[in-house]
Image (cartoon, grey):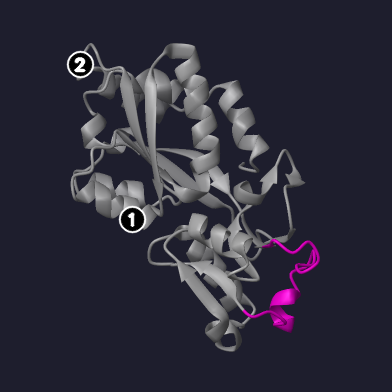
């Protein structure tokens, strides 16, 4: 654990109440599944109840700045947490990177997406799902791929949009879209594709997505947070992150 995180925990611990036994987390959509596993494991070990609310990072930002009572944010980027701290909605000293994610092009059809992603350039599909880039960092990543290959003008009319990549995944899984840009964590487990077909976007095109977490002002007085944050750096949690394809 970095010296910065230890300092943040020390500052957090200096202002805590004595009886908090619940933690409320705001979690970016791509991190929902591993967050649920982490929360369940921590609750089993400590008895501390953890509640989760999952949405696009932009939506969560709006909820937090409008008074939503979350103790921590797990964002899908490395800018939102700092913005919250700058605007006095979070504690800058507690900010840390919890994962690095990767965007993939995925289809529920096991034969549609080839390993090199050339299906995009062929354009032999009706609808491509991409999360709203104003609300979802993985949507930004999806558009970056299209811009890299100069495909946006060609495919613009085929794009369907959702507020976050959970919606994007649902659009593809339901058949509303033939394929879409989602997180590796949504379609892969322990190094294996769970269903359909995918192209893992090379990091030379879209770098790994740095995802930061931070303690929010609502969590300033929650004495359960320091031990929970330490737990996030433990071997069992790191294994969960690895299982879902995070680095």
Question: Disc 2 or 1, which lies upstream in sequence?
Answer: 2
Residue 10 shows in the view: yes
Mark 1: give few (<14), some (14-19) or many (20+) Cα within 10 Å.
some
Mark 2: give few (<14), some (14-19) or many (20+) Cα within 10 Å.
few
Instruction: Left or right? Give the position of 79 relative to 139.
Output: left
Please determine whether, in this image, residue 220 is positioned above or below residue 149.
above
Task: Find the distance from the CA under tag 2 to the CA under tag 1.
Answer: 29 Å
x, y (%) of residue 86?
23, 48
x, y (%) of residue 61?
30, 52
Q: Which region shows up in magenta? A: 107-126
Tell me, for residue 59, which label it has, or none. 1
- Label 1 residue SS: helix
Please determine whether, in this image, residue 169 is positioned above or below residue 149.
above
The residue where tag 2 is placed is: 17
Instruction: Left or right? Give the position of 3 relative to 181.
Output: left
Instruction: Left or right? Give the position of 25 relative to 180.
Output: left
- Asked if the residue under mark 1 is in contact with the one under mark 2, i.e. CB atoms within 8 Å, the reply is no
Verify whether residue 179 appears in magenta. no
Verify whether residue 119 appears in magenta. yes
x, y (%) of residue 184?
63, 51
- Label 2 residue SS: loop
Quarter of image, res 244: top right
Give the quadrant of the C terminus.
top right
Quarter of image, res 135: bottom left
């Amino acid at each position: 654990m970095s010296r910065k995180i230890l300092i943040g925990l020390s500052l957090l611990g200096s202002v805590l109440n004595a009886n908090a036994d619940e933690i409320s987390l705001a979690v970016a959509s791509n991190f929902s599944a591993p967050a649920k596993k982490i929360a369940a494991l921590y609750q089993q070990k400590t008895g501390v109840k953890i509640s989760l609310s999952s949405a696009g990072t932009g939506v969560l930002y709006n909820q937090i700045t409008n008074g939503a009572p979350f103790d921590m944010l797990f964002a899908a980027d490395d800018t939102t947490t700092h913005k919250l701290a700058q605007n006095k909605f979070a504690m800058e000293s507690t900010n840390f990177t919890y994962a690095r994610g990767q965007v993939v092009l995925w289809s529920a059809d096991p034969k549609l997406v080839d390993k090199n992603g050339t299906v995009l350039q062929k354009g032999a599909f009706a609808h491509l799902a991409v999360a709203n880039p104003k609300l979802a960092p993985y949507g930004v990543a999806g558009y970056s791929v299209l811009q890299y290959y100069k495909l946006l003008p060609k495919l613009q009319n085929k794009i369907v949009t959702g507020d976050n990549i959970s919606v994007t995944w649902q659009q593809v899984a339901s058949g509303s879209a033939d394929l879409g840009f989602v997180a590796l964590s949504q379609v892969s487990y322990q190094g294996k594709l769970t269903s359909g077909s995918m192209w893992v976007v090379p990091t030379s095109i879209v770098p790994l997505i740095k995802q930061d977490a931070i303690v929010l002002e609502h969590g300033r007085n929650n004495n359960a947070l320091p031990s929970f944050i330490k737990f996030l750096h433990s071997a069992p949690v790191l294994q969960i992150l690895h299982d879902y394809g995070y680095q």
